[in-house]
Image: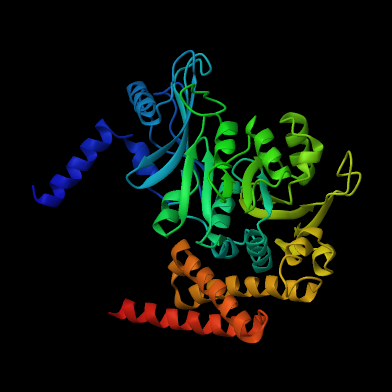
């Protein structure tokens, strides 16, 4: 045997002894999004959800001893219990060629024995240009999101399961300038914090107690949020708002303890369903809920046949402050953008076009050149949209998908912020035409460098 053959055999041996067997092989495919192993093991093949083909069954049927081995490894990796007293384990998993979130069930909750569900994360962070490319959102929606992030707003990303909430939250992190300190709080690590660190972000990850598992050795999410408030001025990102941490989070937002952007995901298919869950299920006072500025809703859109599903950003709404009891009846929600089924795009509403957004005007009131000048604010949002579209166009023209990835998008964002400051110093205001012209020159220069490096 030559060295390559020995290495291949060694990798197979490792995969089937200390690894997860054929699960690793399946999850190494970037197109596979979910992988499910149902009980009883040995009787059911592995099912997957494929990016191109939807729900599929494989010809792989794990045996009972493999499930027992996976359960043991997950206990060791996560430090969380999995036994009859704790029949659910929720954890993150890092494999040689994939990251995944995994849920494991056993008796008595799963009376037929072990069952597993793996949710594969994208190898790299999603970005707003990637979402434009996949038609989840439009350039204008990307520009608005970028503007809101820089405006240090409180943003909730709502949606149903598998709607792309966490992916969108990760893309929003890429929009934060790298001079921001970021604190993330998650019970299962899903956000692309490792990649953010590699890109030069100052980021602290906190892992909290799972609401489902309830491991006593871990810190409660509410305590983690209170700890974050003592760690200096930072953007706070909550992976998913589920339980008692909601009270601590909204209390901090209401009293203004968080000066930078606060963002997180929550289950819900509309702004009102988010209000209902936060106030009625999680017991956050209505007056505290008003500290929420923006609710974005991501949902899956189904084709007429029901065979195809697409992730779309379907709504961006602001939460207004002058209501008392019911924000739906008292017009406490104002849509800035809504989904148009005919065009399969999210379109701006009159509230956004006509400058009636209280949140956006509040952001503008803190900037000298924008105070009382809606046209200047709107031009900045349009400028950001134009930059995002230019990145997508450049990627298509040069056949270079890496331009859509976080590494290049962060560089493009840095250049935008730098040029905005330079132009403002030189001419007294952030002239959108000049900023775009100089940024476009920078983009062309970068494309030439990449082409030259590719040739060499």
Q: In the displayed image of the protein, which residue is found farthest to the left? A: 1
Q: Nearer the viewer, residue 2 or 383?
A: 383
Identify the residue at horizontal 56%, vertical 80% (top origin): 422
Residue located at (78% from left, 34% from top): 285
244 relative to 441 in the view: left or right: right
The image position of residue 222, as x and y in percent, is 60, 32
Q: Quadrant of the C terminus?
A: bottom left
| In front of the other: 191 or 250 | 250
- Height in image: 3 above or below 369? above
Q: Nearer the viewer, residue 56 or 174?
A: 174
The answer to whether residue 401 is above or below residue 273 is below
Q: Position of residue 134 (x, y in %)?
A: 57, 61
Residue 127 seen in the figure: no
**In-image side of 357 versus 141 (left or right):** right
Q: Nearer the viewer, residue 282 or 121?
A: 282
User: At 48% from the left edge and 55% from the top edge, which residue is drawn?
Assistant: 125
């Amino acid at each position: 045997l030559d060295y390559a053959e020995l290495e291949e055999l060694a990798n197979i041996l490792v995969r089937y002894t200390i690894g997860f067997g054929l699960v690793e092989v399946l999850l190494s495919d970037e197109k596979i999004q979910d992988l499910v192993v149902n009980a009883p093991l040995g009787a059911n093949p592995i099912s997957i959800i494929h990016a191109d083909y939807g729900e599929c069954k494989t010809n792989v049927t794990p045996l009972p001893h493999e499930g027992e081995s996976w359960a043991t490894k997950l206990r060791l990796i996560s430090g969380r219990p999995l036994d009859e007293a704790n029949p659910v384990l929720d954890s993150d998993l890092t494999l040689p060629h994939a990251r995944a979130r995994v849920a494991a069930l056993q008796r008595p909750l799963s009376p037929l024995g072990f069952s597993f569900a793996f949710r594969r994360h994208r190898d790299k962070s999603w970005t707003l240009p990637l979402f434009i490319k996949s038609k989840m959102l439009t350039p204008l929606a990307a520009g608005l999101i970028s503007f809101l992030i820089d405006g240090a707003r409180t943003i909730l990303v709502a949606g149903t399961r598998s709607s792309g909430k966490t992916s969108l939250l990760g893309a929003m992190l890429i929009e934060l300038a790298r001079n921001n300190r970021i604190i993330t709080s998650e019970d299962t690590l899903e956000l692309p914090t490792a990649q953010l660190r590699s890109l030069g972000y100052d980021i602290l990850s906190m892992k909290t107690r799972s609401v489902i598992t309830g491991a006593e050795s871990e810190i409660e999410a509410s305590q983690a949020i209170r700890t974050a408030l003592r760690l200096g001025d930072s953007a706070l990102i909550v992976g998913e708002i589920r339980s008692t941490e909601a009270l601590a989070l909204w209390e901090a937002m209401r009293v203004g303890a968080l000066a930078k952007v606060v963002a997180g995901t929550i289950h819900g298919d509309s702004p009102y369903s988010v209000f209902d869950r936060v106030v009625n299920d999680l017991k956050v006072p209505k007056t505290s809920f008003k500290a929420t500025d923006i609710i974005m809703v991501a949902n899956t859109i189904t084709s007429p046949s029901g065979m195809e599903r697409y992730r779309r950003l379907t709504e961006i709404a602001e939460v207004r402050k002058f209501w008392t009891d019911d924000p739906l009846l008292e017009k406490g929600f104002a849509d800035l953008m809504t989904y148009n089924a005919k065009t399969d795009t999210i379109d701006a509403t009159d509230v956004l076009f006509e400058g009636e957004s209280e949140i956006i005007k509040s952001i503008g009131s803190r900037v000298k050149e924008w105070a009382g000048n809606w046209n200047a604010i709107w031009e900045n949002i349009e400028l950001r949209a134009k930059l995002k579209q230019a990145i997508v166009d450049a990627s298509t023209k040069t056949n270079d998908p890496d331009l859509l990835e976080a590494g290049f998008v962060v560089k493009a964002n840095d250049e935008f912020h730098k040029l905005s400051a330079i132009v403002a110093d030189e001419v007294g205001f952030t002239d959108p035409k000049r900023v775009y012209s100089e940024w476009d020159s920078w983009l062309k220069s970068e494309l030439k460098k990449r082409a030259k490096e590719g040739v060499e």
